Image (cartoon, rainbow, N blue to C red):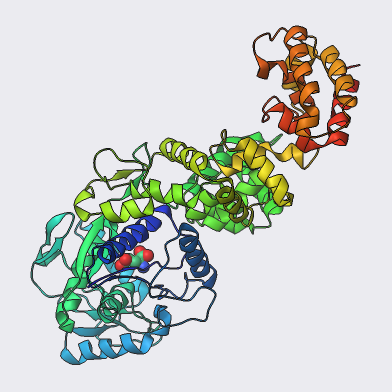
Amino acid sequence: MVKTRFAPSPTGFLHVGGARTALYSWLFAHKHQVHGGPGGTFVLRIEDTDQIRSTAESAAGILNDLLWLGLNWDEGPVVGGAKNEYFQSERLPLYQKHIEELLAKGVAYEAYESPQQLSAMRQAAEKEKRPFRYRRDMPGRQAAPQEGVKPVVRFAMPYKDITVHDLILGDVTVKADEHDDIVIRKSDGFPTYHFAVVVDDHYMQITHVLRAQEHLMNTFKHLGLYEALGWTPPEHAHLPLVFNMDNSKMSKREKAKVVRAAITAHIAPGLPGVTNPKEAALASYTDLSQKSGLPLPVIQDFMSKKSDAVETAIALAAVTKTPLPEIDVQDFRKSGYLPEALLNFIALVGWAPGQDREILSMQQMIELFSLAGIQKTNARFDRKKLAWMNGEYIRKSSLDRLAAAVESFNAVTDYPLKQASRETLMELLGMYHERMVTLAEMAENSRFFFEEPVIDPQAVEKHIRNNNGVNFLKESLALLEAVADWSKVGLHDAHEKILALGADAIGARGKRGAAAQPIRVALSGNAITPPLLETLALLGRERALLRLRAAIDAQT
Ligand code: GLU
């Protein structure tokens, strides 16, 4: 019996790296269902023991993103339902019981330092260039309780080497003198992650823990706890970290970095009459504070790198119009990636299914998945490949599937595409299906069907003012005005004539697409539109003719 789990901390959005951990855990469980074993189970558990950083919105968002990806769980919280036993904050008595047990056994003890004392001890170690490791026999410990300082409980890590038998990395050993006595109960009475994770993995009978390599050094601590509690640990498999193509880690902080760089590069030096850099910065932060509604100190902390808060980054990106990198699952959703394409892509970030296979259905992934195919070294997140894969998925999807995907995309975005009736949406999908890489691209490029076009002056210059475009527009207008039945069928003859005319008039002979450029610019503001006939039909007679007349009037 195989049981895996995904155990996110609800302190932000679901990162694609987290989604990959969830996917691998899901695949591993499902794989064992497929092969007729006693059945694999995938558990979702919300690790909300950090009272300050955990939020209900974050938990709800993570559940939502997992469901959007299609990673459903066999055990875990009910979406939108009440808190239940899969939230760690609901399981405090259980942790408490086992902390008491370790205290009674003498393998856990209360520690009385204040945060200030601890940081002084840490600094002293730093000065002497030795690593700071809290141990029960270290000199200078605070021996007795102090007024106003709530004690924590620490676990007395055994003085011996500990080896993790990792299913991907092999045996990894940490020497006895590298351990420290970790806190297992914080001063607020909550268990730490280390303690709760061990208790839960035990009680939930998890057989395989798959998680990122950044947890490897935690696993030694957990093994110490399993031993002290007299429990058999699960198997562990640590997954490669996710890196960008430029070798930087694909971290949540990237959004903060990008916004900070944009503000530093464009705004601070740009204010008129301010030359002193400090003053320039302050003036610009004050301006940003007014525009964003964020308090000035929040912006100052953010800009001085004291805080990388993603909410601040998002608010500042909005007022400075800085595009943010896609890092979290919902960023990719908002950019119009299909969940099946994103899943397929992240499956390959660190796992090779063999034989250069790339496009894989969920069923194929289940069949092919194995820990042996997971690489030990950092994995690369190749955005170009993701874009390619999304385009492939879009092209092989039915229009009905795409319509459902657009609906889910519309739920988290605010493009005018939202206004499309089912019929219009199906028409649009028919037009864009073959040419879009993301749904956002279609949403952006189809704006002119829903609102007045934004005219690109360069496109006007190139396609209308030059090349005899105005005359061509006038003649086309006359042909279109004569069309009685404004439908794809009814427009057919006029459309053919226009293309032939365009070929002569603007010298685009042989290039049917190019022949229609002046009309495209008139209708949409630029020369990128789906095929002209469909565009005319969908825009409708009145709007199409109005826009053509306006384009002519603007030049005469
Ligand atoms: N709550 C931990 C995190 O989000 C989970 C680590 C684990 O899988 O044990 O990083």
Front in this rendered view, residue 366 or 196: 366
Residue 28, quarter of picture: bottom left
Residue 79 in the figure: left or right of residue 273: left
Residue 503 is situated, as x and y percent measured from the top left of the image, at: 72, 10
Q: Position of residue 432 (x, y in %)?
A: 62, 36
Question: Could you tell me which residue is drawn at 16 percent across and 88 percent down?
Answer: 106
Q: Position of residue 155 (x, y in %)?
A: 22, 79
What number of labels is visible? 0
Quadrant the N terminus occupies: bottom left
Residue found at x 51% / y 73%: 79
Say if 93 sits above or below 32 in the image.
below
Residue 151: image location, x then y, percent = 33, 84
For the residue pair 479 and 293, the one nearer the viewer reads as: 479
Q: Is residue 451 left or right of residue 426?
A: right
As drawn, 384 above or below 527: below
Picture quadrant of ligand 1: bottom left
Instruction: Indicate left or right for 179 with 398 as reference.
Output: left
